[in-house]
C-alpha cells in the first residue's frame, strides 16, 4: 500500500513539473526578457543583451536565480539575433524552422513535443546512471587521453582550433548540455574544428593539466593556447566562441580600392592570394578556418558582392554573384590561376582546391622548410624531382630575366620539375655554391638544375654555362637540358653540399619578444576577468605565500638589525668607564631585557625573575647561575664578574 502511495506521489510530481514547464515555455517572450520592442534593431538587441549578460552572469551575480535568468537571456538573444528565427517567432510565436499553415495548426503538439525532447528527467534522472553507457557512446569517438592530447591535439591546434568538453559521471549539468553539444559538434566538425572530450574521472591528469576544476567545462585550444568558455551553453554562443579563438587578421576585406594592392603582395609575401566572392555581409566561418589552416602558404581576402564598391572586380573577373566563387591569383593579378564555383562550398572541396595551388609558379626560396617542400629528396628512380633554380638579384619590379623565367615555368607540363628562384644577395652562400668560380656571373642572373640526394644538403646539379638573360636562345638551351634529363639523369654531373637557407620572413627577436609578452598579458587578463575563485586559488595561494615569506623576512631582519644596533651602542657612562680603565661591574637586582656588549648584568634569582630569565630564554642566549652564601656573596661575586667580563649575557646569583 505504501509503495502504491509512493508511486502515485511520483506520478503527481512528474505531472506537476510538466505543467509548470509547459506554462513557462508558453510564457517565454524573448522581447520581454531582453526588454526591447518588437521593432528593435539588431544593434539595440545586441546592446540590451550585453547589458543584461553582464548583470546576470553567474560568476558575478550571486542571486540563486541568476543562472536561470542568464540562460533565458542567452536563449532570447539566440532567437532575436537570427533573422530567420526572429521572423518565425513573430509570425508563429515559436523560433522553430518549420513554417506554414501546418505548423500553425500543430503548434500545441509541437510545443509539447519540443518540451518533451528537452526534458531530461525521463531518461537522465530516473535511469541515471543505468543509462550512462548510451549517454557516453555519443562522445566515445572524441575521448582524449593525455598522450594523445600532447602528441596530436597540441601540434594539430596550429592548423585548426579544438573545442573540448570536460565531463564526468553523476554530473547532471553535463546531461543538460548534451543536446546542444551534440548539435554544435555535428556543425563545427564539418567546418574543420577539432572536437575532444575528457572524462575527468578517468583522465584526472589531463583534466588537471587543462585547468578544469569543475564539470562540465568547455574550453578551446588554438596554437597550443587554452581558453575557457564562460557563457551559457547555447549553439550561437559556442559558435561565436570558436570564431573568437581565431586571429582577427586572417581574412582581409577587399574592395575596388585595395584589391590591386592586395593581389600585388605576392612578391613581398611570397604567397598566392585567394579571393572569395559571396553575398554574406560577414566572412563565413568555414572560410576563416580555411585561412587559418593555410595561413603559412596563402593570403586570403573576402569580397562582399552585395556591397557597393565591388562592381569593378566582379565585372573584371566575370563573377557570378549568385554563387560563392573562389579565385586564386599567383604571379599575374589580371588573370586568376584557378577558379572554383559552387552553391554549397564544402570543406573537402575547398581543401582539395587549395592544396593544388599552395605555391607560386616560381616561388622564392625563403627558408629551409620551403626548400624541403618544393624540392623534396629523391626517394627512388621513379620518384625523381628536379628543381630549376633562378639565381637573381633582388629588385622592386619584375626584371626581364625573371619574367622570361616565369613564362617558361608557366608553359611547363612536366610534373617532375619545379621552378623556384633565389635572391643572391639574401642567400649568398647558397648562390655561391651553385655558381662556378668565374666572374662571368657577377651582377647577372644564372639558372641551375639540381636534384637533392639527402636531407644533409647533398645535391647533384648543373649550371647553365652562360648567364640567364631570358632570350629565346636561353629558353631553347634550358628546354634541351630538361628533355635530355628525362632520358639521362647523369647530365647532372656536379656535386655539392648546400648550406641551409636563412629564414628571410622570420620576425626579429624584439618582435617575437613583443608578441610573446602581449600573449602573456592577455592570458593573465583573461584569467583575472573570467576565472572563478576556485580556478584562481592555486595562483592566489602562491602569491600570498610569496608575500608572506617576503614581508616576514623583512620584518624579522628589521627587528634583528635594531637589536644589534642597541647592543652595539652602550651608554656613554659605560664608554667613559672603559676609557678610564674602570672594569668594575655594576650590580643590580632588576632584570635587563636587552644584554649589553661589554657589560655584565647580575640579577638575583627569585620566584619573580625565574620565569623571565630561565624559562623565556631568547634564541642564541645563555644564562649562567652562580650559587652563593651570604658570607661569601660580596667577595666572590665581584671576582666572578671580572672573569666573565668578556662575555655578553647575564649572571644570575642565588
Image: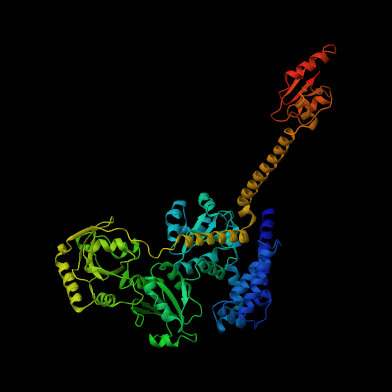
Q: Is residue 593 visible?
A: yes
**Residue reaching furthest to the top:** 631
Q: Residue furthest front?
A: 580
Percent position of residue 263, x then y: 40, 78
Q: Residue 296's x, y, as percent?
A: 40, 67
Foreground residue among 133 and 219:
219
Tell me where residue 116 sits by quadrant: bottom right
Viewer-closest of 203 and 497: 497
Q: Is residue 225 above or below residue 308?
A: above
Q: Is residue 200 visible?
A: no
* 525 or 402, nearer to the observer: 402
Q: Is residue 231 left or right of residue 607?
A: left
Residue 114 lies, in percent from the top left, at: 58, 71
Numbered label tally: 0
Q: Is residue 145 left or right of residue 531?
A: left
Residue at 82 percent of width and 25 percent of height: 609
Left or right of 366 in this view: 568: right
| Chosen colour scheme | rainbow
User: Which quarter of the rendering shows the C terminus?
Assistant: top right
Q: Nearer the viewer, residue 243 or 613?
A: 613
| Image coordinates for residue 484, horizontal then vertical, percent | 15, 69
Residue positioned 34% across, 64% down in the render: 370
The quarter in which the N terminus is drawn is: bottom right
Q: Quadrant of residue 65?
A: bottom right
When the figure is inspected, residue 438 is found, relative to residue 585, above or below; the finding is below
Question: Does 387 sit left or right of 216 as displayed?
Answer: left
Amino acid at each position: 500500500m505504501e509503495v502504491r502511495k509512493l508511486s502515485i506521489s511520483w506520478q503527481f510530481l512528474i505531472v506537476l513539473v510538466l505543467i509548470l514547464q509547459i506554462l513557462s515555455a508558453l510564457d517565454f517572450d524573448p522581447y520581454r526578457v531582453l526588454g526591447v520592442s518588437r521593432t528593435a534593431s539588431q544593434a539595440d538587441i545586441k546592446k540590451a543583451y550585453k547589458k543584461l549578460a553582464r548583470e546576470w552572469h553567474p560568476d558575478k551575480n550571486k542571486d540563486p536565480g541568476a543562472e536561470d535568468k542568464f540562460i533565458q537571456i542567452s536563449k532570447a538573444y539566440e532567437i532575436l539575433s537570427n533573422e530567420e528565427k526572429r521572423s518565425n517567432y513573430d509570425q508563429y510565436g515559436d523560433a522553430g524552422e518549420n513554417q506554414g499553415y501546418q505548423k500553425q495548426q500543430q503548434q500545441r503538439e509541437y510545443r509539447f513535443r519540443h518540451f518533451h525532447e528537452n526534458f531530461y528527467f525521463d531518461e537522465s534522472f530516473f535511469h541515471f546512471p543505468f543509462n550512462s553507457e548510451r549517454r557516453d557512446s555519443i562522445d566515445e569517438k572524441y575521448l582524449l587521453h593525455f598522450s594523445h592530447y600532447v602528441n596530436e591535439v597540441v601540434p594539430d591546434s596550429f592548423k585548426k582550433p579544438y573545442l573540448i568538453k570536460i565531463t564526468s559521471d553523476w554530473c547532471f549539468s553535463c546531461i543538460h548540455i548534451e543536446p546542444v553539444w551534440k548539435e554544435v559538434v555535428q556543425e563545427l566538425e564539418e567546418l574543420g574544428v577539432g572536437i575532444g572530450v575528457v572524462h575527468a574521472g578517468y583522465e584526472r591528469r589531463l583534466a588537471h593539466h587543462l585547468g578544469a576544476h569543475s564539470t562540465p567545462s568547455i574550453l578551446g585550444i588554438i596554437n597550443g593556447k587554452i581558453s575557457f568558455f564562460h557563457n551559457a551553453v547555447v549553439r550561437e554562443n559556442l559558435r561565436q566562441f570558436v570564431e573568437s579563438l581565431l586571429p582577427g587578421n586572417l581574412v582581409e576585406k577587399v574592395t575596388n580600392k585595395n584589391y590591386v594592392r592586395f593581389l600585388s603582395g605576392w612578391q613581398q609575401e611570397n604567397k598566392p592570394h585567394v579571393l572569395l566572392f559571396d553575398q554574406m555581409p560577414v566572412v563565413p566561418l568555414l572560410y576563416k578556418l580555411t585561412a587559418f589552416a593555410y595561413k603559412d602558404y596563402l593570403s586570403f581576402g573576402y569580397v562582399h558582392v552585395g556591397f557597393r564598391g565591388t562592381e569593378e572586380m566582379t565585372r573584371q573577373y566575370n563573377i557570378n554573384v549568385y554563387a560563392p566563387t573562389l579565385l586564386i591569383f599567383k604571379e599575374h593579378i589580371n588573370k586568376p590561376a584557378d577558379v572554383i564555383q559552387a552553391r554549397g562550398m564544402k570543406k573537402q572541396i575547398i581543401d582539395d582546391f587549395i592544396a593544388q595551388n599552395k605555391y607560386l609558379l616560381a616561388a622564392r626560396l625563403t627558408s629551409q622548410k620551403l626548400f624541403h617542400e618544393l624540392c623534396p629528396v629523391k626517394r627512388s628512380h621513379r620518384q625523381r624531382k628536379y628543381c630549376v633554380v633562378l639565381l637573381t638579384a633582388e629588385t622592386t619590379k619584375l626584371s626581364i630575366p625573371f619574367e622570361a623565367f616565369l613564362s617558361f615555368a608557366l608553359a611547363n607540363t612536366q610534373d617532375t620539375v619545379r621552378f623556384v628562384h633565389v635572391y643572391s644577395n639574401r642567400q649568398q652562400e647558397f648562390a655561391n655554391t651553385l655558381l662556378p668560380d668565374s666572374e662571368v656571373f657577377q651582377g647577372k642572373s644564372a639558372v641551375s638544375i639540381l636534384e637533392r640526394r639527402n636531407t644533409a644538403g647533398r645535391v647533384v646539379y648543373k649550371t647553365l654555362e652562360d648567364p640567364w638573360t631570358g632570350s629565346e636562345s636561353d629558353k631553347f638551351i634550358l628546354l634541351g637540358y630538361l628533355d635530355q634529363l628525362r632520358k639521362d639523369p647523369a647530365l647532372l654531373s656536379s656535386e655539392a653540399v648546400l648550406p641551409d637557407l636563412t629564414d628571410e620572413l622570420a620576425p626579429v627577436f624584439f618582435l617575437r619578444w613583443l608578441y610573446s609578452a602581449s600573449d602573456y598579458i592577455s592570458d593573465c587578463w583573461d584569467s583575472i576577468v573570467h576565472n572563478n575563485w576556485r580556478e584562481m586559488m592555486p595562483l592566489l595561494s602562491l602569491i600570498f605565500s610569496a608575500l608572506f615569506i617576503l614581508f616576514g623576512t623583512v620584518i624579522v631582519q628589521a627587528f634583528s638589525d635594531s637589536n644589534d644596533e642597541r647592543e652595539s651602542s652602550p651608554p656613554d657612562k659605560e664608554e667613559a668607564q672603559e676609557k678610564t680603565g674602570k672594569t668594575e661591574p655594576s650590580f643590580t637586582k632588576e632584570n635587563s631585557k636587552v644584554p649589553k656588549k661589554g657589560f655584565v648584568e647580575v640579577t638575583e634569582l627569585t620566584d619573580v625573575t625565574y620565569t623571565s630569565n630561565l624559562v623565556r630564554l631568547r634564541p642564541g642566549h645563555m644564562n649562567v647561575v652562580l650559587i652563593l652564601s651570604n658570607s661569601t656573596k660580596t667577595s666572590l661575586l665581584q671576582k666572578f664578574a671580572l672573569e666573565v667580563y668578556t662575555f655578553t649575557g647575564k649572571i644570575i646569583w642565588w
